[in-house]
Image: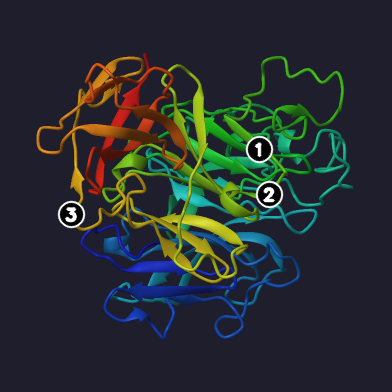
Amino acid sequence: MLSASHDTDNPSLLIVGHDGVVHFWDPQSGVRNTPFLDLGANGLNILDFGGNSEQGINGMTLDLDFDNNGLFYIIYNGYRPDGTGELIDERILCFGTTEDHLRADTEVWYEVLELVQPDQGHNGGQILFGPDQFLYISTGDGGSTGTGAVGGGSGGDDHGPIGNGQNLESLLGKILRIDVHGLNPYTIPSSNPFVGIENTRDEIWSYGLRNPWRFCFDSENGDMYIGDVGEVDWEEINYEAGGSSGGINYGWRLMEGPDCYEPIVDCDPNNSITEPIFAFPHENGLCSVIGGVVYRGQDIPSLNGYYILSDACGFGDTQFFTLISDGNGGWIDQPLVLDVEGGFVPWTETKFAFGEDNKGEVYLCTRYFVYKLLFDPLSPPVDEGGEEITFHPNPVAAGELIRMDLSEVGNVERLSVFDSAGRLAEVHISSSNGDNASFYTTGLLTGVYSVHVDIVGSDEIVYGKFVVYGE
């Protein structure tokens, strides 16, 4: 899902369906009867869809000058629009649009890039313009899942002696970086890390990936987060700081997550591999990481700067996570509880991707619905008669004293502190010395906390919120 324009005053959205249909949604009429683009059976009928659960439209992005030139890019499995050429595992096309930019003009197109894979699946398929205005493309390792044997060495990426992920002569298992020119051939940025090096592909930006289905850029600082789908044991999130010169090796198939994969023992990364910042095992039904976005919108201030991710599968409250830097080279990970009235339908509903509109607000795309994250989980609705209190200082350093403003509230009977996942972090009872308005933040990690205050002799609901930063 993406905005239908770079203009932040335009609230319309494009909803990209894996089945080949790109729907146009606007707040007045909802989803229009005529789609923005249809590559499927009722449209151009050029899509390879159904032979493998990963085949279809995999990604889409608007040209940086879309509001003037009406061009956009799409990556999919299938044939060319004119019926020429063979079935290709993945193509990137540039399409034009009608004069009002409300519908694709399928007579105006140019094939930017073909990606030929040895097996179906593991397509990657995210395409995004980076902060440097170059087009970044994620590619899978070429398919062919292994035997499923746990502990490494199940035979995944069995393409050549080192696999496609480590092979710098292959475009597969990589993040690519190219300079696109609309309906003309792309060129290679001179700053790409492997330009001019023998036996490498100039398009490669980073490598050692298995199936990077979704990646994103932090709109504030250009940091890149890559969700790489695992083989048997681990799902992982990889990270590249904004301003990087590229060339990073993320490890696959030598490593899967934090563990050796091939060979299983005595593997020697030699400090040449950048390990994931977050990895989770296949427990509680988790099966396939869905990389998300770094939140920079306005509606949910407590999530500002957090990377939001999920898993396609999973049960209960283990399906969503957030990551944020701890400021000291490490990362804080914690569950994120998303409440949907009536639950997901069904509650094990498969999650495919997160989307972001042109104002930085976040959407979750599933098999059945598109959900928008609407309200701040740390600012729950206050019942009638409830009040909000303030804290000083706020933000507060970890371990320091923080004080509440209770001038118009009364004496505290109990104060409950909850972390951003909704878990109870601390409980403070009214002290015997009468200091009911202050407490130390010792033991609280960097993050945002919500507070529920019980007032002596009152049923009134009182809420507050404060932020803790590193010592």
The residue to which callout 3 is attached is: 385
Contact (CB < 8 A) between labels 3 and 1? no
Q: Using the image as rendered, state which of residue 59 and residue 384 is in the foreground.
A: 384
- Dot 1 falls on a residue whose secondary structure is strand
In the image, what residue type sits under mark 1?
Answer: Phe
Q: Position of residue 179 (x, y in %)?
A: 45, 45
First in sequence: mark 3 or mark 2? 2
Residue 219 shows which numbered tag?
none
Element under label 3? loop
Figure quadrant of the C terminus = top left
Above or below residue 204? Residue 387 is: below
Quadrant of the rendered structure where residue 435 is? top left
Q: Which residue is mark 2?
A: 286
Q: Which quarter of the image is occupied by the N terminus?
A: bottom left
Above or below, 105 relative to 140: below
| Residue 109, percent from left and from top | 48, 69
